[in-house]
Amino acid sequence: MAEKWTNHKNEINLVNPANKRNIDVIVVGTGLAGGSAAATLAELGYNVKTFCYQDSPRRAHSIAAQGGINASKNYQGDGDSDYRLFHDTIKGGDYRAREANTYRLAEVSGNIIDQCVAQGVPFAREYGGYLDNRSFGGVLVSRTFYAKGQTGQQLLLGAYSAMNRQINRGKIQSFNRHEMLELVVVDGKARGIIARNLATGELERHAAHAVVIASGGYGNIFFLSTNAMGSNVTASWKIHKKGAYFANPCYTQIHPTCIPVSGDFQSKLTLMSESLRNDGRIWVPKKLEDAEAIRNGTKKPKDLSEEERDYYLERRYPSFGNLVPRDVASRAAKERCDAGFGVNRTGQAVFLDFASAIERYGKEQASIHGNYNPTKEEITKYGREVIKAKYGNLFQMYEKIVDQNPYETPMMIYPAVHYTMGGVWVDYNLESTIPGCYVIGEANFSDHGANRLGASALMQGLADGYFVLPYTIGDYLSKDIRTGTIPTDSKEFEEAERSVRETLEKLVNNKGKHSVDYYHKKLGHIMWEKCGMARNAKDLKEAMDEIRALREDFWKNVKVPGDMDGMNAELEKATRVADYLELGELFAKDALHRNESCGGHFRIEYQTEEGEALRDDENFMYVAAWEYTGDPRESVLHKEDLNYEYIEVQTRSYK
């Protein structure tokens, strides 16, 4: 296993530098995966076209990642290694990830940090100047590199600067405010896309020898999520309908530390970084009457003594405490709130408390300053300064949204949809079942199994973009050195553009009575209530029927104001929601067929006596790759068996 990636690179075909100048590559999405891939491919000599719906690649949703990026550097000397990172990732994914891809991810993780430091990414450093690390959920070491609470932003600026260098050289053509609406397949190979200029409404044909999809995940299918409002599944879904298998769509991550829903008119949710669980302790009142008093406002959280608080993660999982994986922490919070111990007005929140950390750091800093008998006020002052240095921007964000000072009163948090482990099926080369169509980052399924560990999304995106795809795509493109320029006047391009135009015309000419958001919210409600943190066969069957009925009503009664020949934000939303209404049915079908609980997929019929996920390795240790047949309900299942040769499959435990 340790030699597989090296041997693979030694055996695959390469493209001569002189020939790379004659090969075009399209990259859809310019977040960490797409931006790093585009910059690296252009650096190698390929001609690259990038597409993003934002007005700049700097606005990709990767910018919202807060807590950090994992790498097995072992700078802390705490026993970390490539194998331990590989093991933690496989275990965290509940033994539902492909072994070879996950080991490669761990193997190249250290290179990512070196690359980003060379770009000038301002990672946090210790007093002596060495890069600092902190811990994330599901591990017993400190391997997460971070830049305060802005790690995604700083990493994206690094990738963007690399892109800009290639744009300046003329090796990257950047098409901002463009959205891919169709994949063009010629003679069975991906040869281009149809994109809509979101500023003018014009449909454009773009040809290339290969197409790379790096458009992120589909968490917005739930309407309320921590994703950016514009994040969508359209690029991935379009290639699925052209022949790319869609793998494990039901594997969705619910992040345990998000600002709770505040009302019916909310349009998105806000993440509070998992890094806060390094120092924050999660609790609810031990007594139901205390929880009710806090909800009613007759008691404040600080009124409860330590003995009156239930630090339920520390109680249930003593080895990992507050740093259990996200799926475990999310279900535990739901269980406490469902039992009546929720602490906000809706009863859907738990506390994340930093009082202990402030006191601990305050005493340590007082000692460093030579103050060996500090007052309580001095301890609090010193402690808050440390917390501010580590998490200041997160605390500021929380206070602006909630209007409460988290230095003085505990944060209120609740799980929310955050990430999707499912995605387009890819092989070891990151190629989909459509030759020449590659999928990287969150858009593919390959590395995380049924649950992603914190700080691993940035790792996968940059690993795919900087260190995997640039090697593997050459193996395919080596066969295209004599192909020449791909023409855009072929019947395949004409048919693809005609199909897109007909869909857009149908939407703008539909004289319906409901807005796009009306349908998106209804879909989100179905998904959250029946395909969310806890699922069962009855709800999933109902969800499939309800989503199908909603989709039919959408095409009859949706109203899209304006026309298609210009900027039209409602039309953009309509095409995305139309895709979600198809994916939603496949999502429920996938969850229904998987009669087990694993990671983020929790079927209440399949759980242990202690309420933990109960896997069925004998019948479901496989990747479920779905082939589109014209109707999501009739999708055909293809199974990729998961064989573990270098890791022992066990019942996952964090106790």
Image: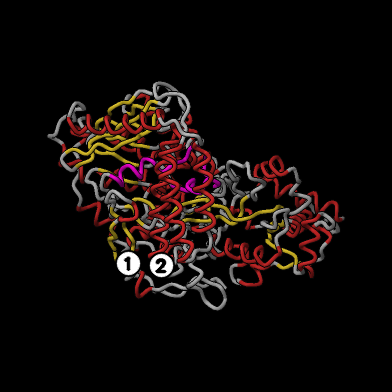
Question: Which quarter of the rendering shows the N terminus?
Answer: bottom left
Is residue 638 inside the magenta stretch?
A: no
Please tell me which residue lies in front, 448 or 637.
637
Is residue 227 inside the magenta stretch?
A: yes
The quarter of the displayed image where residue 626 is located = bottom left
* Amino acid type at mark 2: Tyr
Q: Residues within 10 Å of mark 1 (few under 14, many from 20)?
A: some
Cα distance between the residues tagged 1 and 2: 9 Å
Q: Earlier in the sequence, mark 1 or mark 2?
A: 2
In the rendered structure, the answer to whether residue 179 lies left or right of residue 155 reads left
Region rendered in magenta: 218-241
The quarter of the displayed image where residue 23 is located = top left
Task: In the rendered view, tell whether residue 498 sits above or below residue 458.
Answer: above
Task: In the rendered view, tell whether residue 581 sits above or below residue 95.
Answer: above
**Label ID, residue 95:** 2
Q: Are marks 1 and 2 in contact (CB under 8 Å)?
A: yes
Mark 2 secondary-structure assignment: loop
In the rendered structure, the answer to whether residue 179 lies left or right of residue 522 reads left
Q: Residues within 10 Å of mark 2 (few under 14, many from 20)?
A: many
The quarter of the displayed image where residue 487 is located = top left
Q: Position of residue 206 (x, y in %)?
A: 27, 29
In the rendered structure, the answer to whether residue 618 lies left or right of residue 191 reads right
In the rendered structure, the answer to whether residue 451 lies left or right of residue 190 reads right
* Amino acid type at mark 1: Leu
Q: Position of residue 238 (x, y in %)?
A: 32, 42
Which residue is denoted by mark 1 in the rendering? 642
